[in-house]
Amino acid sequence: MLSQDADVARSQILVAAQTMILRFGIAKTTMEDIAKEAGVSRPTVYRYFQDRETLTTELIRWRSRQTLERGRKFLMECATFEDRLIEGLIYLVYDGINDPIVRILVSPEHVGGDSWLETIPLATSLTTELWGPIFDDAKAGGEMRADIDTGEACSWITLVQLMLAPRLDNSDPADPSHRQMMKQFVLPAFLP
């Protein structure tokens, strides 16, 4: 039974969409499939989500926020900005690749082409939620260059994360070459 509360009802539909996408894949899942799984009519699903793309985007955002929450906890355990940046990037990308829904956003098969370009605004928005406060704190603590605009840094780190996805896919996240590359090319851009 779909809740009378609109936010709860949207969550129920997202859970149904998640179930269907995990079962059939994103390309083969229809709004009818999602409606049946949610126990409602297709027009009811459309009342909460304008179209399939909107529903899919919201599902990815919902699952990505769960990944970000795990990432936030991980980052808070890191002692320095350098550790947060390097270890955090590896952790977040690897965690995203291993989440079957988030993988839609960050997976190597989606990196490149028009569909990848469409994911950048969503990825940047989610990245800013997590990294924005970390960058601001690092600047305030003198660990990051003060002249770097936080929004621009978040946009750039989004691209770094998307570029890391193919590198980390099917590789060991403990591989020291990942850290070495980031220490050499990513970290210096931020240090005072």
Image (tube, rainbow, N blue to C red):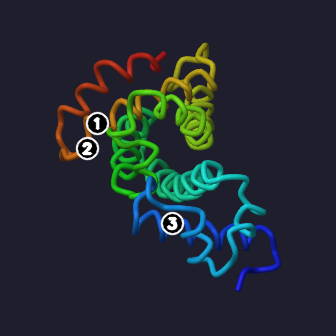
List the single residue furthest toward the top: 147
User: 106 or 134, which lies in front?
Assistant: 106
Tell me the kind of residue under disc 1.
Pro
Q: Which residue is mark 3?
A: 18
Q: Which quarter of the figure is the N terminus placed in?
A: bottom right
| CA separation in Å, label 2 and label 3 | 22 Å
Tell me the kind of residue under disc 3.
Gln
**Residue 40, image x and y in percent?**
68, 78
Residue in the picture at 58% in, 51% down: 61
Tell me the kind of residue under disc 2.
Asp
Residue 166: image tag: 1
Q: Quadrant of residue 171?
A: top left
Marks 2 and 1: in contact by CB < 8 Å? yes
Q: Earlier in the sequence, mark 3 or mark 1?
A: 3
**Residue 154, image x and y in percent?**
56, 29
Q: Earlier in the sequence, mark 2 or mark 3?
A: 3
Element on which disc 1 rests: helix
Left or right of 110 in this view: 157: right
Left or right of 175 in this view: 93: right
